[in-house]
Amino acid sequence: MKQLNLLWVDDEIDLLRPHILFLQEKGYRVDTATNGEDAIKLVLSSNFDLIFLDENMPGISGLETLSKIKSLNPGLPVVMITKSEEEDIMDEAIAGKIDDYLIKPVNPKQILLSIKKNIDMKRLVTEKTTSAYQAEFTRIGLLINTAYNFDEWVDIYKKLTYWELELEGSEAEDMAEVLKMQEADANSGFARFIKANYFSWFDRNDSDKPLLSPNILKQKIIPLLGKGEKICLLLIDNLRLDQWRTIFPIIEEYFRLESEDIYCCILPTATQYARNAMFAGLMPLEIEDIFPDLWISEEEEGGKNLMEEELLKKHFQRIGCDYRFSYNKINNSRDAKKLLDNKADLNNYDLNVVIFNFVDILSHARTEMAMIKELANDEPAYRSLTRSWFQHSNLKDFLKELSFMKHKLVITTDHGAIRVSNPVRIIGDKKTSANLRYKQGKNLNYDPSQVFEVKKPSEIHLPKSNISSTYIFSYSYDFFVYPNNYNQFVNHYRNTFQHGGISMEEMLVPIAVLSPQGI
């Protein structure tokens, strides 16, 4: 480990010799200055890891010195030391972006703690996080090997997501690679679980089936409406659990979390199927049977999610609910501005549905645009980009306004996404669906061992384009590629975020209930 260089600035530096000797014995190099001018000259000529700065000195003050040091090197940690406990001095020092604040007299252990907190923090966090994940690794592995029901897979996914976020903030690159291997192992196990159990979830006698897309309103929204609550259902298209956890601290400024659950997105994990099913309260096959004019098959031209508002209306009518609702789909800043400008209208409804498509748009843009792909080249970068968007978005502004209106907030999504890496060859005709993670068609040629095949779509309540249609779904990190121009398509789509298939990231999606702060 390299020797850390400290600068201590104090007009009574001779009185601090015992402290300086203590730090030198601990392996630190300590330079000194007795005034702000000399300190600034040293900062210009030397590289320091941290500065201890007295607030009250002759000549330019500690606060003035702080300002000049920060203008020269904004990232250099500065610890202010002062005899004064005046609140205005503390406020001014904090506004000047100090990294710590100590009141004289200070003892050597206080100084050492401040150094560790401001310099060694990342190393200490990395060591602690690495040690903690190492201790958890075996337990998670055992869970992966023994999990037999949906709740246990949810628990595994939550643990893996937690450790992914924890390791992201450290420098434990080796452990991050180990975690990736464990996530791959978990996704393989989850794929086997889905293959073994998915058909049974549509048997009415199966009491172990999870909460699925068509039951979200029935089990999560309508009970709240029944209590007389005004509800805003915010659906952020294509939002993964890790992305939700990343933006939640921002939302927490305005709303407090009441509950957080994971539900299971139906197959295909694509908006056309999952979101229509959610608003209709029906599986896609039933939508097509009961409301054929509201279901657009994959072979037909036009948008596949243009009838959600009408499906929601039919849903309420079918179950005998007369709740007033608004439906708002936000595809761009103009739509968002209109929603904000008319926010008072939301009070006229029992339920306000608001769909934000940004994350889904980001996912598609990342596939097609090299610059976005560079900005979000892996999961941590993808999360960071999502958080940055949210921090500066109209959605954040909307939630801030909504918190003043005292509406309860339910945040969820229709499906997640996974970064694909492994191409799987298939053959299909021109009428085969275009999605990379699932295919529907009558002339599909594939290796059955590489896919989850559904030869009778009605068994999982999916419509079919013709009498011999088959659905196939990809597992884990696979994506389907045709033999024609194989290498070109593999290079284009490898390491892109896709949805439609079977993985924890796509199928295990969050739903959270929140109340405005202050209620």
Image (cartoon, rainbow, N blue to C red):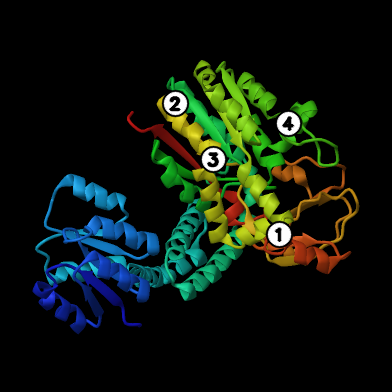
Q: Are marks 3 and 1 in contact (CB under 8 Å)?
A: no
Relative to residue 494, is residue 207 drawn left or right?
left
Query: Which quadrant of the rendered structure holds the N terminus?
Result: bottom left
Kind of residue at badge 2: His
Looking at the rendered structure, the secondary structure element under dot 4 is: loop
Relative to residue 223, is residue 335 drawn left or right?
right
Query: Mark 3 = which residue?
Result: 393
Query: Mark 1 = which residue?
Result: 370
- Cα distance, mark 3 to mark 2? 20 Å
- Cα distance, mark 1 to mark 2? 40 Å
- Cα distance, mark 4 to mark 3? 24 Å
Q: Closest to the observer: 511 or 220?
A: 511
Which of labels 4 and 3 is toward the front? 3
Which of labels 3 and 2 is toward the front? 3
Q: Are marks 2 and 4 in contact (CB under 8 Å)?
A: no
Q: Earlier in the sequence, mark 2 or mark 4?
A: 4
Q: Position of residue 497 (x, y in %)?
A: 66, 56
Kind of residue at badge 4: Leu
Query: Mark 4 = which residue?
Result: 306
Looking at the rendered structure, the secondary structure element under dot 3 is: loop
Neighbours of disc 3 within 10 Å: few (<14), some (14-19), many (20+): some
Q: Are marks 1 and 2 in contact (CB under 8 Å)?
A: no
Query: Mark 2 = which residue?
Result: 407
Kind of residue at badge 1: Ala
Relative to residue 513, is residue 507 drawn left or right?
right
- Cα distance, mark 3 to mark 1? 23 Å
Q: Earlier in the sequence, mark 4 or mark 1?
A: 4
Indicate the quadrant where residue 211 lies: top right
